Amino acid sequence: MWTWQHVLTTVFGGLIFPLVIGLVWGKLADEYKSFGGVLAGFFIVGTIWLLNHGIGLMYEPQMSGSLPGPWSDMALAAFWGLFVADLMEGKKIDWEPVLSGILGGVLGGLLLFAMV
Amino acid sequence: MNLRRILMGMCTGAFAGFGVFTIWPSSLARWNWLGGWLAAGIIITTAWLVNHYAGSMPNKGSGAWVDMALSIWLSALLGGTVVLDPVKGLVRGAYGLLHGANLGGALMTIILQLAGATLAGYLLYAARRSDV
Protein backbone atom coordinates (compact mmCIF):
# COMPACT_ATOMS: atom_id res chain seq x y z
CA MET A 1 0.00 0.00 0.00
CA TRP A 2 1.14 3.51 -0.81
CA THR A 3 1.66 5.85 2.12
CA TRP A 4 2.75 9.49 2.13
CA GLN A 5 6.23 8.31 3.07
CA HIS A 6 6.44 6.32 -0.19
CA VAL A 7 5.15 9.30 -2.16
CA LEU A 8 7.82 11.56 -0.66
CA THR A 9 10.73 9.17 -1.25
CA THR A 10 9.61 8.26 -4.79
CA VAL A 11 9.21 11.89 -5.87
CA PHE A 12 12.60 12.76 -4.36
CA GLY A 13 14.20 9.79 -6.13
CA GLY A 14 12.72 11.03 -9.40
CA LEU A 15 14.02 14.53 -8.71
CA ILE A 16 17.59 13.78 -7.70
CA PHE A 17 18.58 11.58 -10.66
CA PRO A 18 17.98 13.97 -13.60
CA LEU A 19 19.15 16.89 -11.45
CA VAL A 20 22.58 15.37 -10.77
CA ILE A 21 22.91 14.19 -14.38
CA GLY A 22 22.00 17.63 -15.70
CA LEU A 23 24.40 19.41 -13.37
CA VAL A 24 27.43 17.11 -13.53
CA TRP A 25 27.52 14.77 -16.55
CA GLY A 26 28.19 17.50 -19.13
CA LYS A 27 31.02 18.94 -17.04
CA LEU A 28 32.66 15.52 -16.65
CA ALA A 29 32.41 14.90 -20.40
CA ASP A 30 33.84 18.37 -21.12
CA GLU A 31 36.78 17.93 -18.76
CA TYR A 32 37.65 14.27 -19.38
CA LYS A 33 35.96 13.45 -22.74
CA SER A 34 35.17 9.73 -22.95
CA PHE A 35 36.69 9.01 -19.54
CA GLY A 36 34.16 11.43 -18.09
CA GLY A 37 31.51 8.90 -19.10
CA VAL A 38 33.28 6.22 -17.05
CA LEU A 39 33.28 8.48 -13.99
CA ALA A 40 29.66 9.46 -14.60
CA GLY A 41 28.61 5.82 -14.99
CA PHE A 42 29.99 4.86 -11.59
CA PHE A 43 29.58 8.02 -9.56
CA ILE A 44 26.31 9.37 -10.91
CA VAL A 45 24.30 6.38 -12.10
CA GLY A 46 25.89 3.81 -9.74
CA THR A 47 25.59 5.93 -6.64
CA ILE A 48 22.06 7.16 -7.36
CA TRP A 49 21.00 3.60 -8.25
CA LEU A 50 22.07 2.60 -4.73
CA LEU A 51 19.69 5.16 -3.29
CA ASN A 52 16.78 4.78 -5.72
CA HIS A 53 16.67 1.03 -6.25
CA GLY A 54 19.34 -0.53 -4.02
CA ILE A 55 18.06 1.12 -0.83
CA GLY A 56 14.70 1.80 -2.46
CA LEU A 57 13.74 5.48 -2.47
CA MET A 58 11.48 4.59 -5.40
CA TYR A 59 8.65 2.44 -4.08
CA GLU A 60 7.68 -0.38 -6.46
CA PRO A 61 4.91 -2.41 -4.75
CA GLN A 62 4.21 -4.38 -7.95
CA MET A 63 7.53 -6.19 -7.47
CA SER A 64 6.29 -8.26 -4.55
CA GLY A 65 4.21 -11.35 -5.26
CA SER A 66 4.72 -14.39 -7.44
CA LEU A 67 4.60 -12.54 -10.80
CA PRO A 68 6.60 -9.37 -10.18
CA GLY A 69 6.38 -6.55 -12.70
CA PRO A 70 6.24 -4.42 -14.68
CA TRP A 71 9.42 -2.68 -13.51
CA SER A 72 9.48 1.12 -13.81
CA ASP A 73 13.15 2.02 -13.76
CA MET A 74 14.62 5.32 -12.55
CA ALA A 75 15.70 5.78 -16.19
CA LEU A 76 12.24 7.26 -16.80
CA ALA A 77 13.11 10.16 -14.49
CA ALA A 78 16.46 10.68 -16.24
CA PHE A 79 14.84 10.90 -19.67
CA TRP A 80 11.91 13.06 -18.59
CA GLY A 81 13.85 15.52 -16.42
CA LEU A 82 16.40 16.34 -19.13
CA PHE A 83 13.69 16.44 -21.82
CA VAL A 84 11.46 18.81 -19.83
CA ALA A 85 14.36 21.12 -18.93
CA ASP A 86 15.06 21.59 -22.67
CA LEU A 87 11.37 22.07 -23.51
CA MET A 88 11.11 24.82 -20.87
CA GLU A 89 14.13 26.46 -22.45
CA GLY A 90 12.12 26.64 -25.68
CA LYS A 91 13.69 23.76 -27.60
CA LYS A 92 11.38 21.81 -29.88
CA ILE A 93 10.60 18.10 -29.88
CA ASP A 94 12.80 16.36 -32.45
CA TRP A 95 10.99 13.17 -33.46
CA GLU A 96 14.07 11.44 -34.85
CA PRO A 97 15.70 10.70 -31.46
CA VAL A 98 12.30 10.23 -29.81
CA LEU A 99 11.42 7.53 -32.33
CA SER A 100 14.89 5.97 -31.98
CA GLY A 101 14.46 5.84 -28.22
CA ILE A 102 11.00 4.28 -28.35
CA LEU A 103 11.90 1.73 -31.01
CA GLY A 104 15.07 0.90 -29.07
CA GLY A 105 12.93 0.27 -26.00
CA VAL A 106 10.57 -1.98 -27.96
CA LEU A 107 13.45 -4.01 -29.41
CA GLY A 108 15.20 -4.17 -26.02
CA GLY A 109 11.94 -5.35 -24.44
CA LEU A 110 11.51 -8.03 -27.10
CA LEU A 111 15.06 -9.26 -26.50
CA LEU A 112 14.49 -9.43 -22.73
CA PHE A 113 11.18 -11.21 -23.38
CA ALA A 114 12.91 -13.70 -25.65
CA MET A 115 15.75 -14.59 -23.24
CA VAL A 116 14.09 -16.84 -20.66
CA MET B 1 13.53 11.96 -40.78
CA ASN B 2 16.56 9.86 -41.59
CA LEU B 3 15.51 6.22 -41.41
CA ARG B 4 19.05 4.86 -41.24
CA ARG B 5 19.85 7.07 -38.23
CA ILE B 6 16.64 5.95 -36.54
CA LEU B 7 17.48 2.30 -37.23
CA MET B 8 20.95 2.75 -35.74
CA GLY B 9 19.54 4.58 -32.70
CA MET B 10 17.04 1.76 -32.29
CA CYS B 11 19.76 -0.91 -32.27
CA THR B 12 22.04 0.91 -29.83
CA GLY B 13 19.04 1.89 -27.69
CA ALA B 14 18.06 -1.78 -27.51
CA PHE B 15 21.68 -2.62 -26.59
CA ALA B 16 21.42 -0.22 -23.65
CA GLY B 17 18.04 -1.56 -22.54
CA PHE B 18 18.91 -5.23 -22.87
CA GLY B 19 22.35 -4.73 -21.33
CA VAL B 20 21.07 -2.88 -18.28
CA PHE B 21 18.37 -5.40 -17.37
CA THR B 22 20.56 -8.46 -17.79
CA ILE B 23 23.87 -7.22 -16.36
CA TRP B 24 22.39 -5.15 -13.52
CA PRO B 25 20.22 -7.83 -11.83
CA SER B 26 22.95 -10.43 -12.42
CA SER B 27 25.64 -8.26 -10.89
CA LEU B 28 23.32 -7.48 -7.98
CA ALA B 29 22.58 -11.19 -7.42
CA ARG B 30 26.30 -12.02 -7.49
CA TRP B 31 27.85 -9.20 -5.45
CA ASN B 32 24.92 -7.65 -3.61
CA TRP B 33 24.66 -3.84 -3.47
CA LEU B 34 28.27 -3.28 -4.53
CA GLY B 35 27.42 -5.32 -7.62
CA GLY B 36 24.60 -2.89 -8.34
CA TRP B 37 27.03 0.02 -8.11
CA LEU B 38 29.56 -1.72 -10.36
CA ALA B 39 26.86 -2.64 -12.89
CA ALA B 40 26.27 1.06 -13.55
CA GLY B 41 29.89 1.55 -14.55
CA ILE B 42 29.92 -1.65 -16.60
CA ILE B 43 26.87 -1.09 -18.79
CA ILE B 44 25.81 2.57 -18.50
CA THR B 45 29.30 3.76 -19.43
CA THR B 46 29.51 1.55 -22.52
CA ALA B 47 25.95 2.39 -23.57
CA TRP B 48 26.66 6.11 -23.09
CA LEU B 49 29.84 5.87 -25.18
CA VAL B 50 27.86 4.40 -28.06
CA ASN B 51 24.61 6.35 -27.76
CA HIS B 52 25.78 9.80 -26.72
CA TYR B 53 29.58 10.09 -26.94
CA ALA B 54 29.72 8.56 -30.41
CA GLY B 55 26.25 9.98 -31.03
CA SER B 56 24.30 7.00 -32.30
CA MET B 57 21.12 8.43 -30.75
CA PRO B 58 20.38 11.14 -33.34
CA ASN B 59 20.11 14.18 -31.03
CA LYS B 60 20.60 17.58 -32.64
CA GLY B 61 21.49 20.70 -30.69
CA SER B 62 18.25 22.42 -31.65
CA GLY B 63 15.93 19.68 -30.34
CA ALA B 64 15.04 18.72 -26.77
CA TRP B 65 17.55 16.15 -25.51
CA VAL B 66 16.36 12.54 -25.76
CA ASP B 67 18.42 10.36 -23.45
CA MET B 68 19.08 6.65 -23.99
CA ALA B 69 17.28 6.31 -20.64
CA LEU B 70 14.02 6.32 -22.62
CA SER B 71 15.00 3.03 -24.27
CA ILE B 72 16.24 1.64 -20.96
CA TRP B 73 13.02 2.39 -19.08
CA LEU B 74 10.81 1.04 -21.85
CA SER B 75 12.85 -2.16 -22.21
CA ALA B 76 12.21 -3.29 -18.62
CA LEU B 77 8.60 -2.13 -18.69
CA LEU B 78 7.94 -4.26 -21.77
CA GLY B 79 10.32 -7.18 -21.35
CA GLY B 80 11.01 -7.40 -17.60
CA THR B 81 14.42 -8.36 -16.27
CA VAL B 82 16.69 -11.40 -16.64
CA VAL B 83 19.07 -12.58 -13.90
CA LEU B 84 22.14 -14.78 -14.25
CA ASP B 85 21.89 -16.20 -10.73
CA PRO B 86 25.11 -17.66 -9.23
CA VAL B 87 23.18 -20.76 -8.10
CA LYS B 88 20.08 -21.09 -10.29
CA GLY B 89 21.60 -19.95 -13.60
CA LEU B 90 19.61 -17.85 -16.05
CA VAL B 91 16.23 -17.01 -14.52
CA ARG B 92 13.56 -14.33 -14.95
CA GLY B 93 13.66 -11.46 -12.43
CA ALA B 94 10.57 -9.50 -13.39
CA TYR B 95 7.80 -9.78 -15.95
CA GLY B 96 6.96 -7.04 -18.42
CA LEU B 97 3.93 -5.87 -20.35
CA LEU B 98 4.83 -8.34 -23.12
CA HIS B 99 4.23 -11.14 -20.59
CA GLY B 100 0.85 -9.63 -19.76
CA ALA B 101 1.97 -7.84 -16.58
CA ASN B 102 -0.53 -5.21 -15.48
CA LEU B 103 0.60 -1.61 -16.09
CA GLY B 104 -1.69 -0.49 -13.27
CA GLY B 105 0.69 -1.97 -10.70
CA ALA B 106 3.47 0.40 -11.76
CA LEU B 107 1.29 3.41 -12.58
CA MET B 108 1.61 5.21 -9.25
CA THR B 109 5.42 4.79 -9.33
CA ILE B 110 5.53 6.11 -12.91
CA ILE B 111 3.42 9.18 -12.11
CA LEU B 112 5.52 10.08 -9.05
CA GLN B 113 8.79 9.51 -10.93
CA LEU B 114 7.51 11.89 -13.62
CA ALA B 115 6.50 14.42 -10.97
CA GLY B 116 9.96 14.38 -9.39
CA ALA B 117 11.64 14.55 -12.80
CA THR B 118 9.48 17.53 -13.83
CA LEU B 119 10.60 19.38 -10.70
CA ALA B 120 14.22 18.56 -11.53
CA GLY B 121 13.66 19.76 -15.10
CA TYR B 122 12.41 23.08 -13.77
CA LEU B 123 15.37 23.42 -11.40
CA LEU B 124 17.82 22.68 -14.23
CA TYR B 125 16.07 25.19 -16.48
CA ALA B 126 16.24 27.83 -13.73
CA ALA B 127 19.91 27.06 -13.03
CA ARG B 128 20.84 27.38 -16.71
CA ARG B 129 19.00 30.68 -17.02
CA SER B 130 20.84 32.20 -14.10
CA ASP B 131 24.12 30.90 -15.57
CA VAL B 132 23.97 33.17 -18.61
Image (cartoon, grey):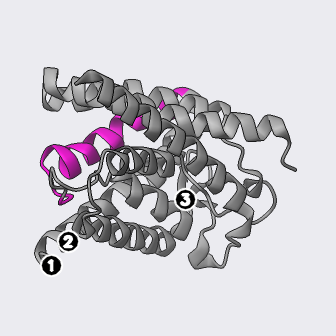
The CA distance from mark 3 to mark 1 is: 29 Å
Q: Which residues are magenta?
A: B34-58
Circle number at residue B81 = 3
Closer to the chain start, of discs 3 and 1, is: 1
Is there any visible trace of residue A68 in the rendered image? no
Q: Quadrant of residue A56?
A: top right
Residue B16: % across, % down? 34, 55
Residue position for label 1 = B3
The CA distance from mark 2 to mark 1 is: 5 Å
Circle number at residue B6 = 2
What is the three-letter code of the residue carrying label 1?
Answer: Leu
What is the three-letter code of the residue carrying label 2?
Answer: Ile
Q: Residues within 10 Å of mark 1 (few under 14, many from 20)?
A: few
The residue that appears at 35% across and 51% down in the rendered structure is A87
Instruction: For the residues labelled 2 and 1, say whether their Cβ atoms are less than 8 Å apart.
Output: yes
Q: Chain of mark 3?
A: B
